[in-house]
Amino acid sequence: MAARLLAGGFALTVWNRSPDKTTPLLELGARGAVTAGEAVRHADIIITMLDSGPVVADVIAAAVSDIAPGALVIDMSSTAQSEAVALDSKLRSAGAMFVDAPVSGGVAGAQAGTLAIMAGGSIADYARAEAVLRVLGNPTRVGPVGCGQLAKLCNQLIVGGTISIVAEALLLAQAGGADPGAVRAAIRGGFAESRILEVHGQRMLDRNFIPGGQVRSQAKDMENILNAAQASGLQLPITEVVTTLYRSILEALPHADQAAALLALEQRNAGIRVGAAPDQLP
């Protein structure tokens, strides 16, 4: 994503908690900063892309005194809706503007500049962010601050649920005596077709659980979905089941690909295993 900003002609200063990660960007023409405060000091637009809401809060806390009044902060991390709202309040108290703009599309989407970007913020703040976001993908304003994170949770609800359903379908095919690879091929192009059946279905058949998206990230998102549902007075029974599935492998396989939902199902169904290939795990 940072490389695309450079290619788009933006003057970019970069900072990372792990300094060596900035080296490839320095070679592409970015300016390096030693601290988060130094990175944001003269910036009109500041983008954070970090592991979780608490990490975003820590980094902003370290930098907020150096953020210029009127600067726009765009957080593209995946956090809780409540965390985005709290961050907005903190930044506005310091005289800065805020948009939450999480993404979907993975590494391939980031490289190609085709990320789906779900933005929450005022109409004016989104208009200011839009030109930058369009270099990174396809942005859509979905509502006020916090709604970007809510839209991302909707996305992850569909992703997590569909991955789990594809895993169940392949396991059922295997248990019933069908060739799960042939079943996948047979149903593609019908109403069951999806990007997840295409990509993660093949990962499951290959037993390739090298990430991609990680179990720990999907599990975090599922917990945030349940928290958002509770805050809205909703019960989401399918999401509750999917969350339990990811919880069951979180400790043992935190860095495995999300397709490891298949492994969680196989643990519940002793003796049934999709295919004969060895597991590829990080």
Image: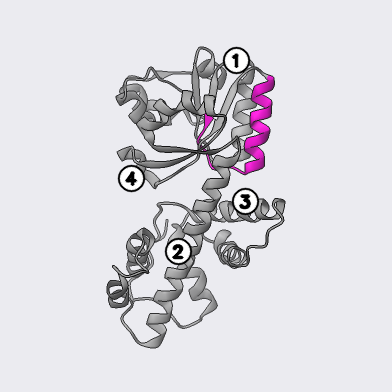
Residue with the mark numbered 2? 163
Could you tell me if residue 254 is visible in this image? Answer: no
What residue does disc 1 label? 66
Is label 4 in contact with label 1 (beta carbons under 8 Å)?
Answer: no
The answer to whether the residues at label 4 and label 2 have Cβ atoms under 8 Å apart is: no
Q: Residues within 10 Å of mark 4 (few under 14, many from 20)?
A: few
Q: Which residue is disc 4 drawn over? A: 108
Sequence-wise, the earlier of marks 1 and 3 is 1
Majority SS type along the magenta span: helix
Q: Earlier in the sequence, mark 4 or mark 2?
A: 4
Q: Say which residue appears at 37% left-offset and 44% top-offset.
A: 107
Q: CA distance from mark 4 to mark 1?
A: 33 Å
Kind of residue sitting beneath label 2 = Ile
Q: Quadrant of residue 61?
A: top right
Q: Gap in Å between the C-alphas at discs 3 and 2?
A: 18 Å
Marking on residue 224: 3
Q: Position of residue 186 (x, y in %)?
A: 28, 75
Residue in the foreground of this view, choosing between 114 and 19: 114
Which color scheme is applied?
one colour
